[in-house]
Image (spheres, rainbow, N blue to C red):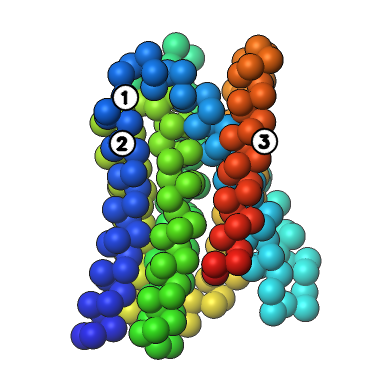
Amino acid sequence: MLIWAYTLSGVVIVSLISLVGIVTLFFNKNRLEKMLIYLVSLSAGTLLGDAFIHLIPEALEDTENTLSPSIFILVGILLFFLLEKLIHWRHCHEVACDKHPHPFSYMILFGDSIHNFIDGLIIAASFLVSIPLGIATTIAVIFHEIPQEIGDFGSLVYGGFSKLRALVLNLLTALAAILGAILVLVLNFSSENLVKFLVPFAAGGFIYIALSDLIPELKKHSEIKKTLGQIVMFIVGIGIMLTLVFFE
């Protein structure tokens, strides 16, 4: 029961990180709208940084067969492409608003759900090894989630969701971490094989979202000042993910 208590406490704390966007409630509408494009840029940087600095190296770690992770990455890209096609087919192509958000908003939610599910698997598996390792893993995940959740929240609002709806949906995707943790605890199994597939799969999804959906949105704003700001925030996103390597 002690392992259950520590694990569920850890994943609940990680899930609550998704509410970090609540700070935007203190900004007025005009100021928030000016910030959103830079948060989209931050999101693109953190997604690519996460994929190339964390997920792909983790997928290649302790494996002699580098072909399998590569295939799973491509599967992730292909599945996210097909998912976006399905969303477009049912999308009414109206101006983005809370009732008609951009398709990439749903892509971010789907990608986040998978990522959070993986976090839950890893946290629970770590606590099954030892409580100190579980605590260390939880702390690493928390530092990892904060910048990504801020960027993702901004992207959801930019994509048409209201701030309140974006907060609620972000929280719901974060709860996938609890599902992943419970799955490991109930079955009391090693999540290694599942993680070997999900990690590169998530990397492929993040690469697709960043390159196919977020960066094209950034290209719509060609003003020099905005472009420089976007580049800075993009680099900041990658830099944060790079810095986290030393803490993890």
Examine the rendered structure and indicate whether residue 137 appears above or below residue 111.
Answer: below
Do labels 3 and 2 touch, CB within 8 Å?
Answer: no
Identify the mark nearer the N-term, 3 or 1.
1
Q: Nearer the viewer, residue 145 or 186?
A: 145
Examine the rendered structure and indicate whether residue 65 appears above or below residue 45.
Answer: below
Identify the mark nearer the N-term, 3 or 2.
2
Q: Secondary structure at mark 2?
A: helix
Q: Secondary structure at mark 3?
A: helix
Q: Nearer the viewer, residue 173 or 139?
A: 139
Examine the rendered structure and indicate whether residue 230 appears above or below residue 10.
Answer: above
On residue 151, the disc is: none
Residue labelled with disc 2:
23
The residues bearing labels 3 and 1 have C-alpha atoms spaced at a distance of: 29 Å
Q: Residue at x 48, y 47 (%)?
A: 147
Residue 126 drawn at (x, y percent): 43, 80
Residue labelled with disc 1:
27
Q: Residue at x 72, y 77 (%)?
A: 63
Task: Answer left or right for 65 relative to 225.
Answer: right
What type is the residue that disc 1 sits on? Answer: Phe
Q: Residue pushed farthest bottom?
A: 130
Residue 58 drawn at (x, y percent): 64, 68
Residue labelled with disc 3:
211
Q: Residue at x 38, y 76 (%)?
A: 135
Query: Mark 3 packing: few (<14 Cα in 10 Å), some, or many (20+)?
Result: some
Query: Mark 1 packing: few (<14 Cα in 10 Å), some, or many (20+)?
Result: few
